[in-house]
Amino acid sequence: MHRVESLKIDSGCIRQVAQTLMENQVSGKILYVSDPVVDSLYGALVKNQIRDIGRLKEEYVDCNTINYAMSIAERVIATDVNCIVGMGGGKVLDVCKYASYISKVPFLSIPTTAANDGLASPVAVLKRQDDKPKSLGCKMASMILIDIEVIANGPKQLIKAGIGDTISNYMALKDWELACRRGQDIMNGYAYLMSRSSLDALMKTQFDCITPEFVEVLVNSLVLSGIAMDFAGSSRPVSGSEHLFSHALDYYSKKKNLHGIQTALGTVAVLRLIGEDTKSVVEYLKRFEVDVNPNHLGIDEDTFIECFQKATLMRTNRYTYLHEIDLCTDRLRNVYNWLTVEL
């Protein structure tokens, strides 16, 4: 398990970059990594703080391939960079996370979205040469600054995706329990408790709409999910059949949707397939206007069926309910039709 040296979650903490780096004895060459859009919004603020305590180097991300992340790691090693400061969404942070892991230098992560639990996870999702996503084990960022104001001012759809990704813990934990009963996995009580706490914090919240106060609850939940993965040594506490379905959509669907939206859809669909009550999950998603109706997402019936029937091929070592239940075409068609009416 890799320990996070510094974690700050608060409004305005984007102004604590220099302080955080100094607290962690970071100086010398510091590589700032972002994308042009985020840089235009917050770049000057962050880069000026870096200049106050070190020598600023810059990199602007335009892709999130494994090769590109490796090239960043090579630059860090070859030019004696002492730390990576990454600011942006999942694409930027995953590139930085993996580059830091390969080059073995500290990484200060400054997320500007809360679309998934990659905020604090030991996993980087990068593209292979065939443009398909690959989840790569690495380590959590050594320093994390999450500015609630920055997240809350971002696109609402990304916040809704974050809600969906946390809700997927509901199904992931059921799958993990099943795998352990079948002797296909081993339970880690600490990781299970953190994932459950992440889910409960969100579903039991007093808020009924997306406000900065709710965003803080969401961010805390996503961070707990990331720490749960670190404790487990895998994504098992937060990733089950609903994630296998989402991965299949990434491979086989022409229409691309946000990861958290896909996993939320997968959660409701699998609960329906295994005969579990979907009411609490569906009501919660509707409460925050998280639309996971497959019709609205551009996922047609044939694609939905194909992705469920091929989902278990996505990760052959991840045992879930999809390995035991009937996934015949007629049954999946009935579930698809139910989803388009109920959601």
Image: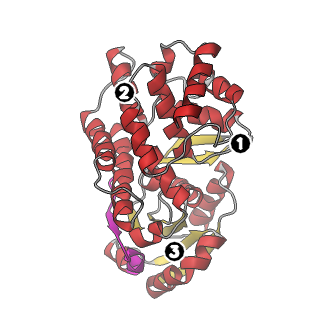
Percent x, y for residue 183?
35, 15
102 left or right of 182 in image? right
Image quadrant assignment for residue 249 = top right
Q: Position of residue 62 (x, y in %)?
A: 69, 62
**Residue type of the residue flagged with mark 1:** Lys
- Residue in front for this viewpoint, 173 or 33: 173
The part of the image, by quadrant, that contains residue 91 is: bottom right
Tag 2: residue type? Lys
- The residue wearing badge 2 is 174
- What is the three-letter code of the residue carrying label 3? Ile
* Residue at point 43%, 38% (across, down): 282
Horizontal arrangement in the rendering, residue 78 relative to residue 150 (left or right): right
Q: Number of labelled discs?
A: 3
The reply to whether dot 3 and dot 1 touch (C-beta < 8 Å) is no
State the extent of the magenta-drawn residues as a range.
3-18
Q: Earlier in the sequence, mark 3 or mark 1?
A: 3
Q: Residues within 10 Å of mark 2 (few under 14, many from 20)?
A: some
Say if the magenta span includes residue 259. Answer: no
Disc 3: which residue: 30
> Which one is nearer the viewer's eye here, 130 or 223?
223
Q: Secondary structure at mark 1?
A: loop
Local SS, label 3: strand
